[in-house]
Structures are given as structure tokens and as C-alpha cells.
Image (tube, rainbow, N blue to C red):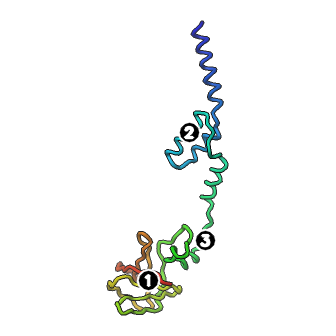
């Protein structure tokens, strides 16, 4: 009889303890992206301590990250290559296509390409590159925001930098 009474008291005490856990706080912890901070959040909730960041603040931050306004592609094309100067939006194009309107050559034999979309790109280095006025070119984004130009339909690329 004594064992049954002890077991009943133990079950009652654990069920009352589990009802004291803040379910909202656990849900807030599940939204924390950093593994260590999420674990610390769960530990605080189980220990009965107050979680420092309420659910509403976390949910607002989560919604703010997902509801970014996407600009039109035409505006992105105008900013292609000038992201660092103008702090363009987070969405970046991988490449643009345009027609060469004018080619100038500087004393170091580096070319400057004026494109039909009013962008001006300067060759970096002295690599050979065969393109004529009126040819379609593709400018491709590389690693660390570097750029390369190539004639459409070919594989030969050279590094370039946008100057206007």
C-alpha cells in the first residue's frame, strides 16, 4: 500500500511539473538559428527561468527576413558591377548580356568597352580578347565579386572592372 501511495504522489508531482513548462517559450526556442543559443534557450525554459527574447520579437525578426521586396530585373542590370559603391540589394544577377557599342584602347593595351546599356567596363590585365563593335558580349559574376567578359557563343574570358 505504501508503494502505491508513493508511486501516485510521484506521478502527480511529475504531471504538475510538466504543466508548468512554458510551451510558448519552447516554440520561441525552436526559432533560434544558432545551435548553442537554441540549446541554452531550451535549458532556461526547462529550468523555469525566463527566456530573454519573447516569442513575438523572434517571430517579427523571422517575418522581416522573409518578406524582402524584390526589385525589377531592369534596375538590377543597371547596378550590375557597382554593388559595393551603391550598396545594391541582396539579390544579385549572375550575368548580363549586351552589345558592344564602342571599344577604346589605352597605352597599356587594355580595352575599355562601352555597351548598349550605357555601362562601361575596363579590361584588367593584358590578356588577348577578340571582340568587335556590334558583337554581343556576356559579363559573368565570378568569386569575390569579380567579373569576366566573354563574346557570346565563345569560351574565352578576360577579367574586367566596371567603371561607369
Q: Disc 1, disc 2: CB below 8 Å?
A: no
Q: Name the N-terminal-most of marks 1 and 3.
A: 3
Image quadrant in which you'd find residue 144: bottom left
Between residue 90 and residue 149, name the one nearer to us. 90
Image position of 141 (left or right of 42): left
Name the mark nearer the viewer: 3 or 2: 2
Residue at 53% over, 44% down: 38
Residue annotated with mark 1 = 137
Residue depicted at x 56% and y 41%: 41
Between circles 1 and 3, the one closer to the viewer is: 3
* Percent coordinates x, y for residue 100 in the rendering: 46, 88
Residue under numbered circle 3: 71
Q: Residue at x 35, y 87 (%)?
A: 130
Picture coordinates of residue 18, whole percent (x, y): 62, 29
Q: Secondary structure at mark 1?
A: strand
Q: Residues within 10 Å of mark 1 (few under 14, many from 20)?
A: many
Secondary structure at badge 3 equals loop
The residue that mark 2 highlights is 42
The residue nearer to you, when weighing 95 against 26, is 26
Sequence order check: which comes first, mark 1 or mark 2?
2
Residue furthest out toward the right: 56
Label 3 crowding class (10 Å Cα cut-off): few <14, some 14-19, many 20+? few
Amino acid at each position: 500500500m505504501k508503494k502505491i501511495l508513493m508511486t501516485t504522489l510521484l506521478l502527480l508531482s511529475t504531471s504538475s511539473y510538466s504543466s508548468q513548462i512554458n510551451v510558448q517559450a519552447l516554440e520561441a526556442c525552436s526559432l533560434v538559428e544558432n545551435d548553442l543559443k537554441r540549446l541554452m534557450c531550451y535549458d532556461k525554459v526547462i529550468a523555469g527561468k525566463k527566456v530573454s527574447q519573447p516569442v513575438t520579437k523572434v517571430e517579427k525578426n523571422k517575418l522581416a527576413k522573409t518578406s524582402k521586396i524584390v526589385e525589377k530585373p531592369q534596375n538590377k542590370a543597371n547596378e550590375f558591377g557597382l554593388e559595393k559603391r551603391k550598396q545594391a540589394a541582396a539579390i544579385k544577377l549572375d550575368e548580363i548580356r549586351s552589345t558592344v557599342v564602342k571599344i577604346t584602347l589605352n597605352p597599356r593595351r587594355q580595352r575599355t568597352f562601352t555597351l548598349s546599356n550605357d555601362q562601361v567596363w575596363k579590361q584588367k590585365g593584358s590578356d588577348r580578347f577578340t571582340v568587335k563593335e556590334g558583337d554581343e558580349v556576356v559579363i559573368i559574376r565570378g568569386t569575390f565579386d569579380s567579373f569576366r567578359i566573354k563574346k557570346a557563343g565563345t569560351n574565352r574570358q578576360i577579367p574586367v572592372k566596371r567603371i561607369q
